[in-house]
Amino acid sequence: MTVPLKELEFTLLDVLGFADSEHDQHIAADLSLRETALDVLINAEKIAVNTLAPSAQKLDIEEPYVKDGRVVLPIETQQALKQLAAGGFIAMSFDEKDDGLDLPFSLSQACAALFASANVSIYSYALLTQGAANLIAHFGSPHQRARWVPEMLRGQVFGTMCLSEPHAGSSLADILTVAVPRDDGRFSVRGRKMWISGGEHELGENIAHLVLARTPDAPAGVKGISLFLVPRFRNATTRESNGVTLIGLNHKMGWRGHVNTALAFGDEEECIGELIGSLHKGLTYMFLMMNEARVTVGLCAAAIGFAGYQYSLAYAHERRQGRKLGERNPDSKQVPIIEHADIKRMLLAQKVYVEGGLDLVIYCAKLVDILRSSADALQKQRAALLLDLLTPIAKSWPAEYGLEANKLAIQIAGGAGYTRDLPLERLYRDNRLNPIHEGALGIHGLDLLGRKVSMHDGEAIKTWQQEIEKTLAASEAYPSLLPMCQDLRSALDKLLKVTETLVLTQKNGNVEQSLANATLYLDAFGGVTVGWRWLVRSLVATQRLTTREQESDINGFLRGKIKACEYFRLYELPRYCAELDTVGLMETPPLTMQGDEF
């Protein structure tokens, strides 16, 4: 099961106005952008359904293993990645001078949703490579860009990000990997890295590792970190080693087809790397890839949640069990379980989680398109503020609630749901990684409340508020949307008031008290944001039903958006308001509880 094309078309083309945006007009004028986007999505769906999805279960069972010092993967992995590269799906959003296709990033992300919902274990190799290539394109030297990026986009070279170390985890200030200058301007890199996805395999001719390290005279902490490009082979043709050694494999509960490694650099022989950009700016550069990866984690979470939702929806239509509550005759036929109210409640919850999460992520991708292509300086400034503010939410909210959707999918299937005969338990395991991938929820809560909402004197959250106010003003013209408008405005006001109190508490020096419930704040901020996105979706559906009533084949689809928004208003939004009430009290049992009291 993959994300339906109809859903992607609605979100990308109708809700986000993809085909109407000025900054997308760099596409050839003789092409209809909407038709081009649909053609691309149709081709992506073919690969997702015919190539990626059939091998998902096999990759989950046949995990990577080491033979003669090399990682062995099922042949389907390489075959699928070759198809993705040949179809331009790795290169599609990159500049033409890098052998890219110069297509909008939002279209690329819509395709990514198809691939991730079909088989995230395979597609994640492409995602990491895109992120690494984008970093090199932004910050590498002209030689590095010309040498590496085209080969990465063609699927000849794959990329990684090497941040964490066994002793440090997410605390990058404590990394010990060192890079010593050589006479030729390059560096000898020595150290160990942990949790490196795609760190060793035979899928391409080479692997470009992006490695955080310190030079011997570097300042302490994150200000002394630099970034180095370290190839697996010095010469890909002769496979001359570059001193990158596989120490072992990590065996994760999900994404089991994507090899995860511990690597040593320079243990057995010299490992040579090239500096990217300037010394001591490595973490700044890496944040481009990290933030891109964070939004991608949200995308994968929503997509995996979508796969489970689609399967449980089909199951609910087919599975007959029980009778309607008022039916007393035991000889009457059993009904499909989708006729039971509680099943529909769980399906509605999945729907608002996965569609809302996917909408949020593709909205963020649209902001990237504005930053890349808009000629309007103010529009670009607003897009940058929104993207910075929403990145921790776009990672965390879909990761948390995509997983919740998978849990509900298992519940709908009952006893069959947690067996390996159905894909639902695999999808749940795959999605359980995403609340931790690229930073646990707590890290992003601290980022949002401790930095993002107050940056630039609160300009980012003001911009976010203005966008919501625009939607509220447009929606209030439709009586059927007034209840959601009123409740969303109330939630927005409460969030802004709590934010003001918490930021003031930080400024007064009570940082720990202000940030003690940052994760709850992150959840509530995400819920209000997704509530806004659902109002946008409901507004678009209402307008289409008003102006295109003759399209009877899509009326049910559009009514479903409006009813899902109403479900969000009644079932989800009150929970976020309650969280804000708790956060606003600034009662902090986690701070006052002592270790010996647990």
Image: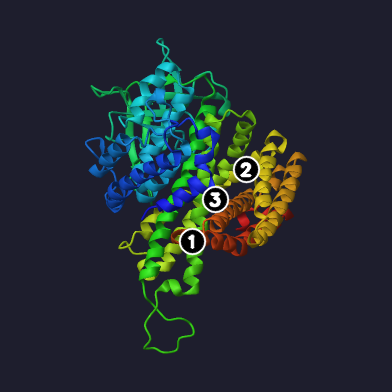
Q: Nearer the viewer, residue 215 or 367?
A: 367
Apparent side of residue 342 relative to residue 528 in the rendered image (left or right): left
Pointer 1: residues within 10 angstroms few (<14), some, or many (20+)?
A: some
Residue beneath label 3, please?
A: 397
Which kind of residue does numbered mark 1 sit on? Asn
Q: Tell me which label, 2 or 3, sits earlier in the chain.
A: 3
- Label 3 crowd (10 A; few <14 / some 14-19 / many >=20): many
- Residue 531 in percent (x, y) is at 60, 54
Camera-near label (3 vs 1) is 1
Rendered view: 345 above or below 100 = below
Where residue 382 appears, x then y in whole percent?
Answer: 63, 35
Query: What whole-number distance in Å separates the C-alpha atoms at marks 3 and 1?
Result: 29 Å
Q: Percent position (x, y) of residue 88?
A: 34, 34
User: Which percent across, then down, holds residue 11?
Assistant: 49, 49
**Type of amino acid at the residue the image marks with label 2:** Leu
Residue named by callout 1: 555
**Closest to the observer: 237 or 468?**
468
- The answer for how far apart the CA atoms under marks 2 and 1 are is 39 Å
Neighbourhood count class around disc 2 (C-alpha, 10 Å): few under 14, some 14–19, many 20 upward: many
Find disc 2 in the rendering and name its residue: 448
Question: Which of the 4 quarters of the picture holds residue 230?
Answer: top left
Q: Which quadrant of the rendered structure holds the C terminus?
A: bottom right
Query: Mark 3 belongs to which amino acid?
Result: Trp
Q: Please tell me which residue lies in front, 413 or 314.
A: 314
Q: Residue at x 31, y 45 (%)?
A: 47
Query: What secondary structure is marked by label 1?
Result: helix
Query: Sequence-wise, which precedes: disc 2 or disc 1?
Result: 2
Asked if residue 231 can be seen in this view, the reply is no
